[in-house]
Image (cartoon, helix red, strand yellow):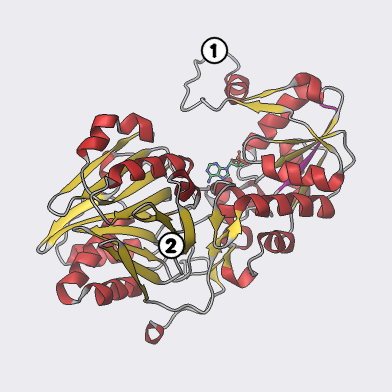
Amino acid sequence: MHEECGVVGVSFKDEAPAALSIYYALYALQHRGQESAGITVHDGAQVRTLKGMGLVPEIFNRQDIQRLKGHVGIGHVRYSTTGSSKIENCQPLLVSFKSGNIAIAHNGNLVNSKELRTELEKEGRIFLSDSDTEVIAHLLVKKLMNYELEDAVQELMKLLIGSYSLVILIDNSLIVVRDPLGIKPLCLGQIDNGYVVTSESAAIDILNGQLIRDIAPGEMLIFSNGSYESKHLVKSRNHAHCVFEYIYFARPDSVIDGELVYNVRMRIGKTLFEEHPAKADIVSPVPDSGITYAIGFSKESAIDYMEGLMKNRYIGRTFIMPGQDMRETAVRLKLNTIRPNIEGKSVVLVDDSIVRGTTSRRIIDLMRKSGAREIHVRIASPPIISPCYLGIDMATREELVAAHKAVKGVEAVINADSLGYISLEGLVKSIGIPLDDLCVGCLTGEYPVEIPGERCTRRQLKLSEF
Ligand code: AMP
């Protein structure tokens, strides 16, 4: 199961209501998941949860937030496409055990959850969902039966392979954990009277807070009574921050592992021009994902930035009635051309990535129909040649157009006059984090953890290193 998610945890010193801050933070993280959302809070005596399918404002109203009493809590937004769109998979996942309640929200994907689940099932444990988060919940409860919290979490981390940024409520203690490779983002912020931990720092800004730092890979933080304690539970020689967070997934106003996503994207745009210059009348982004790159490209090339396409931001899950030219209607509903800006012109069209190639093809066809003379496509990632197993919902290898075709072949598929992808070196330089500390599995087919049937470049952690 492939998922994309956002998580948040809030801990206040006094009786301030955590649910309202979590609600605002989930709004800020909505781009990370639009399928379901949930909030769990604890008031020192009782745990309360509300979760549902849909967007944050569709699930929570003012009364709900007021009813969710508690000074500590966690929240989650989730998106998945592989047939698991059901309420059982919504998070936070709440379980009760001998000593109390545990609520967990997870961003990431375990690559060994099947094996772990089979082991647990052999012991007679039952599962209500097909999410790997439930596997984590079972294992945590199991470890808490035999160990104190710190050791229990460390023992849990020894079993998990993959990406996991976790926010956990054990009664009224907030615990946050980031996997030893730091694959998915997680950061800490100070807010009035307390702390917030969230997938992206933009959510801290929305709460008028200050970003303190990233949660270190392999680190656990325990919050109680308005302060927190840090434990580095697992060491790792290198990290594996997901490049796709910078390329597509994260908001440009977020700082991830020390780099402002906007600045990274500007640098990528500049590098794209250096590597693949073009003679053209205008530089135009595919909105919204191509905008910052196109600005960078335009600055460096001194070719005018001009919008050739306009996006409908309210499109949601619109249905298209059969009988019209469905394909064109579907594209035009989402993206329409600004005809005079492109008519008779040579256009550099900038986008973040090509996955299946279908979007680019449709956009280019539309632009040609609107009179664009030439279309030179520039892409802010190297060709995506391998699937993601670690938390980005992408596509299967068969579906990835660049897995089977060289650049010229993709150029033909999307019907561009020219096509240039940024190089891996150019991307890494633009991000500003060494290649050894990035996960570039989707771009190279070499992953930072062992995945059956795939190549792994990293030295595996030995148990003695925990
Ligand atoms: P396509 O090549 O038709 O599969 O579409 C690629 C476009 O979808 C890219 O230009 C991105 O803007 C967007 N995209 C890339 N990755 C994802 C993802 N994981 N989820 C949703 N949209 C994505």
Q: Cβ(mark 2) to ligand 1 < 8 Å?
A: no
CA separation in Å, label 1 and label 2: 44 Å
238, 424: nearer the viewer: 238
Above/below status of 92 relative to 329? below
Q: What label does residue 323 carry, if any?
A: 1
Residue at 71% across / 45% down in the picture? 293
Q: Verify whether residue 374 appears in magenta.
A: yes
Residue type (three-letter) at the residue carrying disc 2: Ser
The outermost residue toward the right is 279
Is residue 90 at least partly visible in the picture? Answer: no
Q: Is residue 9 left or right of residue 31?
A: left
Q: Using a 10 Å C-alpha cutoff, classify the residue at mark 2 as few (fewer than 14 neighbours), some (14 to 19) or many (20 or more).
A: many
The percent position of residue 173, horizontal first and vertical second, equals 24, 61
User: Can you say which quadrant of the picture contains the C terminus?
Assistant: bottom left
Q: Pointer 2: what residue?
A: 163
Residue at 66% across / 26% down in the picture? 310
Residue at 78% across / 51% down in the picture? 270
Residue at 74% across / 28% down in the picture? 308
Q: Quadrant of ligand 1?
A: top right
Residue type (three-letter) at the residue carrying disc 1: Gly
Circle 1 — which element? loop
Residue range (magenta): 371-379
Q: Verify whether residue 184 appears in magenta.
A: no
| Res 358 quadrant in image | top right
Mark 1 / mark 2, whichever is N-terminal = 2
Q: Cβ(mark 1) to ligand 1 < 8 Å?
A: no
Is residue 2 at least partly visible in the picture? Answer: yes
Circle 2 — which element? loop
| Res 152 quadrant in image | bottom left
Q: Is residue 299 left or right of residue 366?
A: right
The percent position of residue 455, horizontal first and vertical second, equals 55, 69
